[in-house]
Amino acid sequence: MPEKLRQYRMKFERVPDGEVAIPNPREMLGLRSKLGGEPDWDQDAEVPVCPHCKEQMTFVAQIDSIEHMSEDNPNECHPQEYMFGDVGMIYVFWCIPCDEIKGVLQYG
């Protein structure tokens, strides 16, 4: 059985229409996790295609390297268990009709 990672509780807050969840993603390293909207890509867009229907998949969530060492990050810690490459991000996509999921990892 693989090692268990440290647990974090997430608080969800709806973003009002016309606003974005992460206003300055390049300046908020470690604080960019969110559900829905558009992905805040670390690199070029990399939207996966469903292996069944061949359509682009729907963006569901992004999970940031939440333990990034920064005085502005309340989750910074050492040793870091949630550091995806160089302060990277995991993106989750879903093909709703085919019920297929796919993850994408990007980092600096």
Image (tube, rainbow, N blue to C red):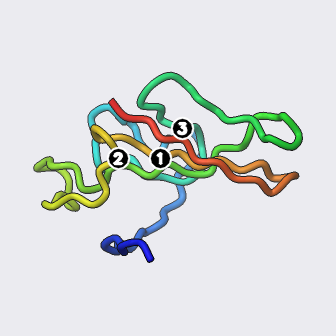
Q: Amino acid at mark 3?
A: Pro
Distance from disc 3 to disc 1, alpha carbons, whole Å, reads: 10 Å
> Which residue is identified by label 3?
39
The image quarter in which residue 67 lies? bottom left
- Which residue is pictured at 64% across the width and 44% down the height? 59
Residue 98, horizontal then vertical, whole percent: 85, 52
Distance from disc 1 to disc 2, alpha carbons, whole Å, reads: 8 Å
Residue 73: image tag? none
Residue density around tag 3, few if under 14, some if 14–19, many if 20 or more, within 10 Å: many
Q: Earlier in the sequence, mark 1 or mark 2?
A: 2
Whether residue 77 is situated above or below residue 47 in the rendered picture? below
The quadrant the C terminus occupies is: top left
- For the residues bearing labels 3 and 2, Cβ distance under 8 angstroms: no
Q: Amino acid at mark 2?
A: Phe
- For the residues bearing labels 1 and 2, Cβ distance under 8 angstroms: yes
Residue 84: image tag? 2
Question: In front: mark 3 or mark 1?
Answer: 1
